Image (tube, grey):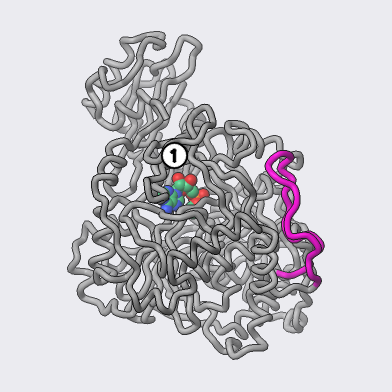
């Protein structure tokens, strides 16, 4: 991977570890996939007889209104791959209605823990009622099958209710993370021409209010496609309501005519379910498109087998539903499986760093799924916090979002998992719909830091620059050689897959390229090495450096900007911005904080640079391309130019010394 490799030290460290942890016997005995052999046989079958494998899975896991004719067609040549054509089904019916005829009718579907410790519980029956009512509201407001509905809500029950209501009537939802700014919201609404926006007066996180409606109003100023806006009252309700456009959720759902059951929209297997925007290495965020049957099957099956869900379990995924993890593993996967899914409005450190463990104790959580960044943040507060709580209900732990360092893995295992609970380090992406590479907790000998094995039907290959297969132990680019049911069907506004081809398929023809580096060890276990493109992963949130650069350059003081990630103890990666000022502006701490605030306003607090380094010039090749590897090394604190690799293509060698000096002065 030449100069793009950022994690050589980590790889060596991990390789030196060489420790494996066998699945506990008791766990394996009851697990869905209980031995390594079971996995291998099923995995082989999923690749050798994919039609049969996926037909059986689709028949077993989903309820169909009309059966499908074809399991799969098309492929990576034309990018017109399709799953379960001819089949008709409804996602909301699979997540709710079908459980009503079983004992699960009165099982808790959703448990909500509020920021300040209040609880709301919805049984499957109750959730069905709420979804049906709101689906009627959507219809009343003129939302029809195929229309886009933007959802900009905090972590409150109305968020999954709104999503499922869209699914019920065939509207395509696009959830925008509540931490995004008004301009980020505007950009997403405009891109998919949403007809409606669902938001709240405010959000409450960690005791602090987030003014969602104010941001929504600002965005809607320039969103002519939005005809109506439904507002949930989470706070005091003290916000401006635009007559003719804005109405209150609680008033809408109490109209008598929305109480009658809302009929299900029969959806074709490949009808769109949702759009979720995500950052890439170039340009604006892409609206990743997922469709009905393949996505639902994949999220449900991965959830059941990897999270090893049993009917009596309380399962808690701490993600925000504004990201894909919340879509697949708080809402769709768990509800399709008839699980009890806990959702949490708050943050890990409020009112104190024991909050996660207090919630685990309160609900006797059995399966706990979080991000390495949260674990690192809590680790810093010491083992005293978890030790104060009864965590004995936990039988499975999971992580997602970024590579987990072996030290952090071990702390998680020992302190939260009593040294005996399996950990599933699940590797996947917005585009993949569900887990791509993951341990199976009853079958996989775990290696701290490794995401282990490909999921069924996934055929990964780590390749070199020239596309040839990398040797065992050799770092390379992670690609996938054939479609799987949960993968993206395209990006919004790109009907001929031009952009999709460029982003995911051009670099390695005939393969899906993840944008991540990986290596496979001698046992066939996968180790993820981080992004190899210009995407940085800040606290498990994916950000394109290009977006942050455009935000900086949109400020009048900035003439040019280059953004890179640097290793950060808690966030995984921090944001280091090199900024060149326009004539007439002078570097100062004040200006640095103004620029940080500007990025925060344009994108959101997650994109705020940790450091701004003013510079006179950037290292460029003679053809004018910024040499980012040099900027990354400098940001990481490297001072020896010998370590920078080949500098002969540099147009102006002096730049490097100046930047090193500038970094030292920060
Ligand atoms: C990274 C989140 C290592 C990876 C589900 C990927 C991981 C990006 C892991 C996707 C993991 C996610 N180990 N890296 N277990 N999980 N990543 O789209 O770089 O928000 O490409 O989806 O997160 O981020 P996204």
Residue 364, position as x, y percentages in the image? 36, 81
Q: In this rendering, is residue 468 above or below 219?
A: above
In the image, which residues are magenta? Answer: 66-90
Q: Is residue 318 above or below residue 122?
A: above
Badge 1 marks a residue whose secondary structure is: strand
Which residue occupies 48% across, 79% down?
A: 310
Q: In this view, does 553 lie to the left or right of 523?
A: right
Q: Residue 266 vs residue 45: left or right?
A: right
The answer to which quarter of the image holds residue 164 is bottom right
- For disc 1, the neighbor class at 10 Å (few under 14, some 14 to 19, many from 20) is many
Image quadrant in which the N terminus is located:
top left
Q: Where is residue 610 in the image (x, y as percent from the top left)?
A: 33, 39
Q: Picture coordinates of residue 42 (x, y %)?
A: 55, 63
User: Does 488 lie within the magenta span?
Assistant: no
The quadrant holding residue 580 is: top left
State the residue in front, 665 or 530. 530
The number of numbered discs placed on residues in the rendered structure image is: 1
Residue that badge 1 annotates: 517
Query: Is residue 155 rendered to the left or right of residue 397?
Result: right
Instruction: Determine the main secondary structure of the stretch shown in magenta.
Output: loop
């Amino acid at each position: 991977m030449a100069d793009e490799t950022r994690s050589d030290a980590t790889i060596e460290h991990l390789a030196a570890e060489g420790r494996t942890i066998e699945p506990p016997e008791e766990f394996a005995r009851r697990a869905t996939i209980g031995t390594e052999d079971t996995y291998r046989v099923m995995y082989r079958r999923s690749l050798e007889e994919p039609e049969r494998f996926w037909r059986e899975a689709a028949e077993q896991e989903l309820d169909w209104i009309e059966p499908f004719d074809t399991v799969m067609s098309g492929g990576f040549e034309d990018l017109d791959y399709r799953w379960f054509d001819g089949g008709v089904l409804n996602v909301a019916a699979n997540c709710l209605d079908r459980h009503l005829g079983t004992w699960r009718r009165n099982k808790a579907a959703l448990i909500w823990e509020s920021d300040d410790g209040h609880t709301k519980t919805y049984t499957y029956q109750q959730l069905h009622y709420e979804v049906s009512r709101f689906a009627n509201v959507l219809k009343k407001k003129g939302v029809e099958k195929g229309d886009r509905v933007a959802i900009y809500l905090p972590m409150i029950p109305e968020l999954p209710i709104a999503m499922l209501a869209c699914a019920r009537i065939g509207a395509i939802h696009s959830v925008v993370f509540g931490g995004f700014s008004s301009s980020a919201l505007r950009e997403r609404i405009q891109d998919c021409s949403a007809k409606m926006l669902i938001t709240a007066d405010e959000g409450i996180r960690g005791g602090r209010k987030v003014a969602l409606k104010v941001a929504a109003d600002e965005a809607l100023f320039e969103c002519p496609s939005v005809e109506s806006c439904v507002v949930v009252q989470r706070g005091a309700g003290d916000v401006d309501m635009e007559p003719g456009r804005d109405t209150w959720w609680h008033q809408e759902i109490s109209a008598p005519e929305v109480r009658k059951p809302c009929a299900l929209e029969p959806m074709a297997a490949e009808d769109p379910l949702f759009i979720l925007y995500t950052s890439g290495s170039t340009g604006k965020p892409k609206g990743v498109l997922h469709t009905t049957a393949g996505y639902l099957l994949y999220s449900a099956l991965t959830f059941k087998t990897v999270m090893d869900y049993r009917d009596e379990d309380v399962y808690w995924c701490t993600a925000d539903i504004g990201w894909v993890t919340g879509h697949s593993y708080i809402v769709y996967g768990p509800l399709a499986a008839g699980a009890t899914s806990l959702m949490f409005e708050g943050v890990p450190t409020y009112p104190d760093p024991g909050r996660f463990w207090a919630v685990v104790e309160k609900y006797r959580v059995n399966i706990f799924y979080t991000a390495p960044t949260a674990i690192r943040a809590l680790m810093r507060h010491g083992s005293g916090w978890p030790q104060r709580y009864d965590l004995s209900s936990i039988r499975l732990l999971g992580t997602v979002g970024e590579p987990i360092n072996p030290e952090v893995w071990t702390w998680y295992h020992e302190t939260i998992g009593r040294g005996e609970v399996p950990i599933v380090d699940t590797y996947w992406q917005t585009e993949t719909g569900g887990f791509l590479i993951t341990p199976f907790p009853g079958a996989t000998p775990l290696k701290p830091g490794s995401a282990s094995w490909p999921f069924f039907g996934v055929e990964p290959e780590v390749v070199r620059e020239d596309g040839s297969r990398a040797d065992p132990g050799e770092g390379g680019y992670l690609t996938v050689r054939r479609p799987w049911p949960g993968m993206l069907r395209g990006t919004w506004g790109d009907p001929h897959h031009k952009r999709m081809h460029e982003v995911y398929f051009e670099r390695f023809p005939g393969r899906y390229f993840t944008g991540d580096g990986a290596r496979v060890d001698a046992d066939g276990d996968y180790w993820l090495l981080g992004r190899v493109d210009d995407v940085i992963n800040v606290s498990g949130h994916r950000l394109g450096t290009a977006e942050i650069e455009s935000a900086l350059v949109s400020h009048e003081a900035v003439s040019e900007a280059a953004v890179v990630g640097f290793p950060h103890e808690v966030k995984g990666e921090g944001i280091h911005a090199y900024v060149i000022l326009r004539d007439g502006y002078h570097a100062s701490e004040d200006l640095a904080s103004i620029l940080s605030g500007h990025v925060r306003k344009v994108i959101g607090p997650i994109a705020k640079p940790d450091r701004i380094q003013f510079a006179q010039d950037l290292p460029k090749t003679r053809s004018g391309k910024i040499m980012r590897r040099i900027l990354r090394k400098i940001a990481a604190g490297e001072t020896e130019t010998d370590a920078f690799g080949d500098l002969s293509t540099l147009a102006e060698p002096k730049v490097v010394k100046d930047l090193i000096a500038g970094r030292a002065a920060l």
